[in-house]
Amino acid sequence: MPPPIEFLHFVLTGGSSGSEAQVLLALAVMWLLAKVGTEICHRVGLPRVVGELGAGLVLACLAKALPTLVPQPANVPGMEYFAEIGIVVLMFAVGLESTVPEMVRVGLPSFRVAVLGVILPMVLGLLGSHALLPAGSPWIQGLFIGACLCATSIGVSAQVLGERGASRTREGRVIMGAAVLDDVMGLLVLVLVSGLVLVAGNGGGLPWATLARTLGLAVGFLAGAFTVGRFLTPHLFHLADRFRSEQVLLPVGLGFAFMLAWLGSKAGLATIVGAYAAGLILERAHIKHLEERELHSLDELLHPLVVSLSPLFFVLMGSRIDPAALVSPTALLLATVLAVLGTVGKYAAGYGAGKGMRVAVVGWGMVPRGEVGLIFVAAGSHLRMGGMPLLPPEVQAGIVGAILLTTVVGPLGLSWVLKPR
Amino acid sequence: MPPPIEFLHFVLTGGSSGSEAQVLLALAVMWLLAKVGTEICHRVGLPRVVGELGAGLVLACLAKALPTLVPQPANVPGMEYFAEIGIVVLMFAVGLESTVPEMVRVGLPSFRVAVLGVILPMVLGLLGSHALLPAGSPWIQGLFIGACLCATSIGVSAQVLGERGASRTREGRVIMGAAVLDDVMGLLVLVLVSGLVLVAGNGGGLPWATLARTLGLAVGFLAGAFTVGRFLTPHLFHLADRFRSEQVLLPVGLGFAFMLAWLGSKAGLATIVGAYAAGLILERAHIKHLEERELHSLDELLHPLVVSLSPLFFVLMGSRIDPAALVSPTALLLATVLAVLGTVGKYAAGYGAGKGMRVAVVGWGMVPRGEVGLIFVAAGSHLRMGGMPLLPPEVQAGIVGAILLTTVVGPLGLSWVLKPR
């Protein structure tokens, strides 16, 4: 039997460890702080996402100073899943604003922007790390650093494009298309570069079979979604239309998007790519009747979910910035230089969009990096070459710093070039 | 260095354990299955919540049969938090449909129903377990079993009342008021009965100080919310009204509700009681201007969150039913008898509503038990008397079974007496 006092405490706290209530408190604090952050940004003309990232950074600092009072979002149980759902719902809603034919029409410019946006940051990252890192550092290290800078974070630009009413412009579509494609390319680059590391360490050949499998899965998922998926989707929603109970559209729509997000992740892609594909495939015509019956469009039903859940993703992202890790001069210098090179490389990729498009919009839209780059750093942190870690802690901090700087600089630039004049 | 194959697998799965994607899949399956369940219930005239509970039970059976293919909702990381958020948002939305003065007007009938609804099930539970349990079982055991049957699950009836358009009737308000009050009383009973167990085991006096503190905290929270809280709320939303950025109402509203839910849980109450109180306190007049500016009422903004998140709570609840535990004859008999006694006791409590009210509506509305009763069982499972567990496994399974039966029978009865004729 537990001691009486402890048991009565257990009874008084409702029998649980109270973690559910702590999660509610953390969510409330995150919402209110994010709102204050976006309000400040709104007043000085900055995009909303900067306010949300800033709220996360402030929360992280407060949690470090007053650990008993303020929750660190990354430590709140379940928070990573709320954030994941938030960004998946956001990408589904963004995908709904375009259709597959509209994306095919910008396929070539998207492809050019994506290719340039992978090659240029890699080359610049390689040169930059060659200049900054101690002499004798293996060139593969520079290559890996460059690889971490090649995947655009689709969510950040999507939010700014939506806020500025530019999601349905051609530039907006090129950005989204290129961001999906560079997710596929980034995956290949990661497999290739980590294959090179293993070859340099262990000998043997390059992992061609793995490369082919990676490419095959990713391209296969996208091709399957845009052909078989597009064929099956009307049938699924036609079936849902035969339901007689109320409130069918939102659960079925979410179920559809989450299924594709899961399938995409099985093919090695980020879940948000699958959710975005779900939005592209689903067309107004398939759900017109359901929308009329429920008196709300799917957009309208998703809106409150996006408003309440997607800020959690950006606040959590901001709270992951470790102010202490950025204080080291090496890391700080590396972060700044890599951020500048990464910004220049992606901006220049905007020229791939070709004639008749605003290069500055496409270029700035490609600048933000995010979760994919951070995953690359995490993957690289496990690699060793000649008995030494491929990415020493300060280098890791530098790359993470650079990624986060582009996440703040990107929306600033994009929002500036989209500003109504 | 990890072996190459493992590393490449790690790379291919996006660097994560894939648990985010698994959560997305589980949510999609839960939504789609819940939709099928509610559709079946809709066609045969049963309330929606029965379909959602049934979907959970089916999912639990499938997960048991095909553990590699089908996720058991209770094991999905973060699911308990999604469910918690779902029920908290539902209770906030339900609270918004009434105001504090409206609840005060039904205060006396609610109080009578709550008192009867605690005393009658306790007495009946005590008698029933005396008849069924082996001779010589301590009477405190029966008292504890009765205590597990005294807290109404507010969420289930709230959903049925909403579905039948009866939330704003006087009966609906009495049910909600009595459910809040019996949550407070249930807490006191639990402290009292577990105090008796400790006294019987250890000697010493009853925990009067703890009882007083429990009552003081719970009543203090409710009184504070309805006085200080009601005074401060207009000021909070007036402040939010001065924000110039968009999409203020929903995050601030949710932040407000979640804060009160957390505060309520600090006072020992279930989080849903705090969320319901938040809804009662917040009045249309406080947010009229914000609603006009954002072209949506708070109800409309909450609706998609309720539709998508609250089914997760009921599916999860249904999935917690362990079919195997109910197969034992002792447990099955105990469950059936306790469910009948618990239903009769709560139904009879409906007579406390007094003249001019439909007793059957109030009575059936009080029948469903839920998370609070389950928490009591969990608390009791730790107690021992004379070296023996107070609640042997079969008795625990019987009480849990009875609680779940009332969760299914309650909405059936309520929905039946509310059916448009």
Image (cartoon, coloured by chain):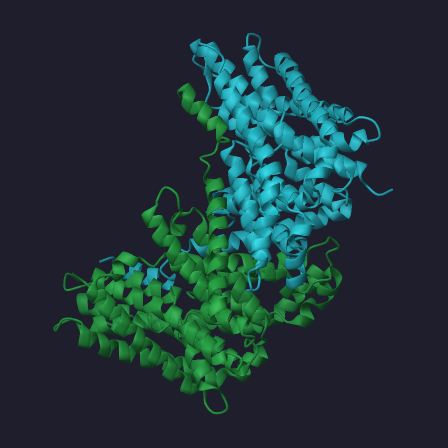
Chain colours: A cyan, B green
The one nearer the camera, A59 or B309, is B309
Is B193 placed left or right of A122 in the picture?
A: left
Q: Residue furthest bottom?
A: B355
Q: In this figure, what is the number of numbered marks?
A: 0
Res A178 quadrant in image: top right
Is A399 placed left or right of A101 in the picture?
A: left
The one nearer the camera, B309 or B48, is B48
Residue depicted at x 55% and y 22%: A190
Is A71 placed left or right of B237 in the picture?
A: left
Q: Residue B99 location in percent, x, y? A: 59, 76
Res B181 quadrant in image: bottom left
Q: Residue A378 location in percent, x, y? A: 50, 28
Residue depicted at x 64% and y 22%: A333
Q: Residue furthest right?
A: A421
**Residue A158, relative to residue A284: is it above or below?**
above
**Residue A405, relative to residue B258: is it above or below?**
above
Residue depicted at x 84% and y 43%: A420
Q: Residue B330 location in percent, x, y? A: 20, 66
Q: Residue furthest left?
A: B136
Is A182 placed left or right of B200 in the picture?
A: right
The one nearer the camera, A330 or B402, is B402
Q: Residue B239 location in percent, x, y? A: 69, 61
Say if residue B48 shows up in the picture: yes
- Quarter occupied by the C terminus of chain A: top right
Say if residue B184 shows up in the picture: no
- Quarter occupied by the N terminus of chain A: bottom left
Residue depicted at x 63% and y 15%: A126
